[in-house]
């Protein structure tokens, strides 16, 4: 079993729990986390002892508070599209996994965190969890599949509203919109996730993997994801993104130049 610098990776009785482990940065997805997730999923695919996966975040406060905004200032201005494609491809690896993957959302699931949860097959949220796509505050758009998967999960009207306003919603609202499958007390998050996974693991693994493949094919063209990457790339080149990301780092409100 490999070890990962930004993940805890533990397999017990057929269930692999992957915990994103950057609590001081609210488990934000920097390049290393994405690389580690990519390799961890390769291990999940290859290891016959792993039958199902729970993906969660370390600590009481956050599942994943988004892509690491501080890295957005380091990435070359014209590399936004590649950045988006890299994230999308790792999240496809999770979504396409033939073994069931449950997101146990233990707090903030914002931006890339909400996108990561949506790439999992089911979502269980603790009652303190919060969801949203606040990229618009940074002069950006969701780039890791959020424009596509949120629309699929909750419908175009509500998805458009959340993406355009950047509003953060409660676990209860997420349940009502169909963004999550269950909401539980914080202490019961992992046991509830395990219980659901155990039900799935009691079924035919062949049927489960084929069902995942078939459901994922529902109206899920890659054209939408490609357009998302292109639009993310264009937004990444804007002065608004420069101002939005700087303002976050400097802990102030952005003043967008609108270009
Ligand atoms: N990228 C990089 N660092 C992040 C981060 C992100 N997405 N989200 C949080 N952090 C860091 C903060 O900069 C802070 O670091 P510091 O202690 O070195 O200053 C630390 O995590 C704790 O976050 P903080 O903002 O102090 O916590 P809070 O309770 O006041 O606010 C949030 C929590 C989630 C509301 C706030 O962190 C936030 O808005 N994060 C960004 C969400 C976002 O826009 N995500 C989409 C990114 S594409």
Image (cartoon, rainbow, N blue to C red):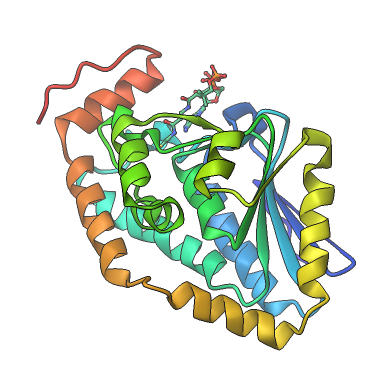
- Front residue (pair 191, 176): 176
Foreground: 3 or 101? 101
Q: Residue at x 73, y 57 (%)?
A: 3
Can you say which quadrant of the picture contains the C terminus? top left
Residue ID at (37%, 54%) = 151
- Quadrant where the N terminus lies? bottom right
Residue at coordinates 36% horizontally, 57% vertically from top-left? Answer: 148
Q: In this rendering, would 12 be left or right of 193?
A: right
Q: Position of residue 55 (x, y in %)?
A: 67, 53
One can see residue 122 in this view:
yes
The one of 67 and 178 positioned closer to us in this rendering: 178
Above or below residue 103? Residue 258 is above
Where residue 97 appears, as percent x and y from the top left, is: 59, 73
Query: Is residue 7 in view from this perspective?
Result: no
Q: Quadrant of residue 173?
A: top right
Give left or right: position of 98 versus 68. Answer: right
Q: Position of residue 85 (x, y in %)?
A: 34, 60
Q: Residue at x 48, y 62 (%)?
A: 90
Residue sticking out furthest to the top = 252
Q: Position of residue 111 (x, y in %)?
A: 44, 40
Question: Number of numbered discs present?
Answer: 0
Q: Residue furthest right?
A: 13
Q: Residue furthest left?
A: 259
Compared across the picture, whether 174 is left or right of 249 comes to right
The extreme bottom residue here reads: 206
Vertical relation: 129 (above or below) 7: above
């Amino acid at each position: 079993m490999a070890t990962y610098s930004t993940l805890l990776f533990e397999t017990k009785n057929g269930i692999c729990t992957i915990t994103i482990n950057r609590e001081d940065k609210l488990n934000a997805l920097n390049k290393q986390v994405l690389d580690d997730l990519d390799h961890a999923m390769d291990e999940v695919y290859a290891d016959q002892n792993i039958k199902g996966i729970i993906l969660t975040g370390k600590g009481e406060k956050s599942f994943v508070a988004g892509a690491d905004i501080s890295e957005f200032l380091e990435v070359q201005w014209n590399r936004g599209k590649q950045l988006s494609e890299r994230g999308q491809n790792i999240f496809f690896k999770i979504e396409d996994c033939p073994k069931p993957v449950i997101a146990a959302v233990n707090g903030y699931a914002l931006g890339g965190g909400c996108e990561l949860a949506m790439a999992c097959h089911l979502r269980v949220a603790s009652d303190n969890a919060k969801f949203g796509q606040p990229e618009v505050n940074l002069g950006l758009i969701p780039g890791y599949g959020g424009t596509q998967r949120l629309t699929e999960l909750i419908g175009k009207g509500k998805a458009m509203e959340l993406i355009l306003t950047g509003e953060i919603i409660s676990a209860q609202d997420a349940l009502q919109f169909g963004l999550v499958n269950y909401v539980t007390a914080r202490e019961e998050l992992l046991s509830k996730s395990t219980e659901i996974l155990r039900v799935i693991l009691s079924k035919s693994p062949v049927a489960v993997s084929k069902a995942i493949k078939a459901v994922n094919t529902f109206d899920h063209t890659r054209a939408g994801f490609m357009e998302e990457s292109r639009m993310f790339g264009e937004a990444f080149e804007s002065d608004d993104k420069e101002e939005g990301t700087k303002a976050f780092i400097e802990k102030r409100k952005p003043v967008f130049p609108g270009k």
